[in-house]
């Protein structure tokens, strides 16, 4: 059963969730959503930039570069949603 289904059932039945269970369900949902989004981006990259021998060498190279960039973006989405760190926190400097 997906985390979305568990969250929906908890909300519609009126059953209160303990904070740790709610946090766990939201983490699972974020991970599932990230995987689904990453899979969609990867599929879109395969559709847009298929491996073909048509075109010039330059156009094939550009297509490979674009495909690679989209694949790296999909992996970043998957990794970022799995860890929960979508951004990096800047280091805090002391005001003098």
Image (tube, rainbow, N blue to C red):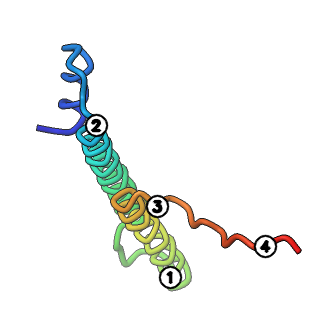
Residue bearing the label numbered 3: 85
- Cβ atoms under marks 1 and 3 closer than 8 Å: no
First-in-chain label (2 vs 1): 2
Callout 1 crowding tier (Cα within 10 Å): few <14, some 14–19, many ≥20: few
Question: In the image, which is nearer the foreground, mark 4 or mark 2?
Answer: 4
Q: Tell me which label, 4 or 3, sits earlier in the chain.
A: 3
- Between 36 and 3, the residue placed more toward the observer is 3
Where residue 92 sits: x, y (%)? 70, 70
Quadrant (top left/top right/bottom left/bottom right) for the N terminus: top left
The image's mark for residue 22 is 2
Question: Image point 50% across, 85% down: which residue?
Answer: 57
For marks 1 and 3, the one nearer the N-term is 1
Mark 4 or mark 1, earlier in chain: 1
What residue is pinned by disc 4? 94
Q: CA distance from mark 2 to mark 3?
A: 19 Å
Nearer-the-camera pick, 25 or 57 = 25
Q: Is residue 56 above or below residue 3?
A: below
- Label 2 or label 1, whichever lies nearer to me, is 2
Regarding mark 1 in the picture, which secondary structure is present there?
A: helix
Mark 3 Cα within 10 Å, few/some/many (few <14, many 20+)? few
Nearer the observer: mark 1 or 3; the answer is 3
Mark 1 lies on residue: 61
* SS under mark 4: loop
Q: CA distance from mark 4 to mark 3?
A: 24 Å
Cα–Cα gap, marks 4 and 1: 47 Å
Q: Which numbered disc, 2 or 3, marks the residue closer to the eye?
A: 2
The quarter of the picture where the C terminus appears is: bottom right
Q: Residue at x 40, y 61 (%)?
A: 45
């Amino acid at each position: 059963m997906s985390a979305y289904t568990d969250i929906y059932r908890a909300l519609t039945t009126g059953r209160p969730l303990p904070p740790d269970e709610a946090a766990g369900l939201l983490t699972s949902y974020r991970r599932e959503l990230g995987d689904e989004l990453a899979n969609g981006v990867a599929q879109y990259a395969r559709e847009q930039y298929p491996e073909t021998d048509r075109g010039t060498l330059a156009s094939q190279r550009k297509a490979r570069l674009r495909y690679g960039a989209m694949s790296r973006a999909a992996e970043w989405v998957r990794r970022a949603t799995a860890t929960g760190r979508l951004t990096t926190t800047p280091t805090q400097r002391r005001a003098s």
